[in-house]
Amino acid sequence: MKFFLDTADVDAIRELNDLGMVDGVTTNPSLILKAGRNIEEVTREICEMVQGPVSAEVVAESAADMIREGRHLAQIAPNIAIKVPLTWDGLKACRVFADEGRMVNVTLCFSPAQAILAAKAGATFISPFVGRLDDIGLDGVDLIADIREIYDNYGYETQILAASIRSVNHIIEVGKIGADVITAPPAVIKSMAKHVLTDKGLEQFTADWAKTGQKIGG
Ligand code: G3P
């Protein structure tokens, strides 16, 4: 399972990247706002740090304008994946970028039908939003399962990038299904290390060790 970090927070990316856990990064307009940084400046910094794909999102509505913005963003670094929304214009832009040999991440996917179109348009990644479907009482994990089944039936090479991941459980569930990539906030990735029995066990070991009166290494 590849881990992408869903953030434009450079310090948070560095911490996990130094551990070799970061396979890529995804950003979006909301995350750029949260970081309070200039999109080109922060994206360049992230691209220099992380070797894998770094998604940078266009904001235009028409295919022509998306193509212009996407080509501009792609100049930032060779590892840019241009992120386009799953609209008809976004799919047109996706096809143009794919034919130019650029990586494309089609975002805001909420149905298997949309995911099929993204694959047909040559997307490198499809981003189904798990958490946002859960938010409206649907099952985001089911969407990942449906897309996995359909893509496997036809051998589509588009990678399933499970997005809007909000919990460790989401990561486990989409991992069982075989999502190629998950993108999650750094805090969610770090919380994968937590377990109540780990804490309890460590407490016990620390207490027992103190009773031995020993020291390791002098
Ligand atoms: O990158 C898009 C996606 O991961 C958004 O997540 O938590 O804002 O629904 P969220």
Image (cartoon, rainbow, N blue to C red):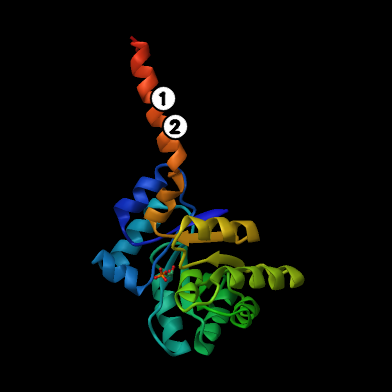
Q: Position of residue 9 (x, y in %)?
A: 31, 58
Q: Amino acid at mark 2?
A: Gly
Of the four image quadrants, the one with ligand 1 is: bottom left
Q: How packed is label 2: few (under 14 Cα within 10 Å), some, or many (20 or more)? A: few
As drawn, 68 above or below 56? below
Q: Residue furthest left?
A: 36
The answer to whether any part of residue 13 appears in the image is yes
- In the image, 124 versus 150, the foreground residue is 150
Label 2 belongs to which residue? 201
Q: Is mark 2 within 8 Å of ligand 1?
A: no
| Element under disc 2 | helix
Q: Position of residue 137 (x, y in %)?
A: 49, 77
- In the image, 47 versus 111, the foreground residue is 111
Q: Position of residue 34 (x, y in %)?
A: 27, 67
Q: Residue at x 47, y 47 (%)?
A: 21
| Element under disc 1 | helix
Q: Position of residue 80 (x, y in %)?
A: 45, 65
The answer to whether any part of residue 217 appears in the image is no
Q: Residue at x 55, y 81 (%)?
A: 96
Label 1 belongs to which residue? 205
Q: CA distance from mark 2 to mark 1?
A: 6 Å
Q: Are marks 2 and 1 in contact (CB under 8 Å)?
A: yes
Q: Amino acid at mark 1?
A: Phe
Q: How packed is label 1: few (under 14 Cα within 10 Å), some, or many (20 or more)? A: few
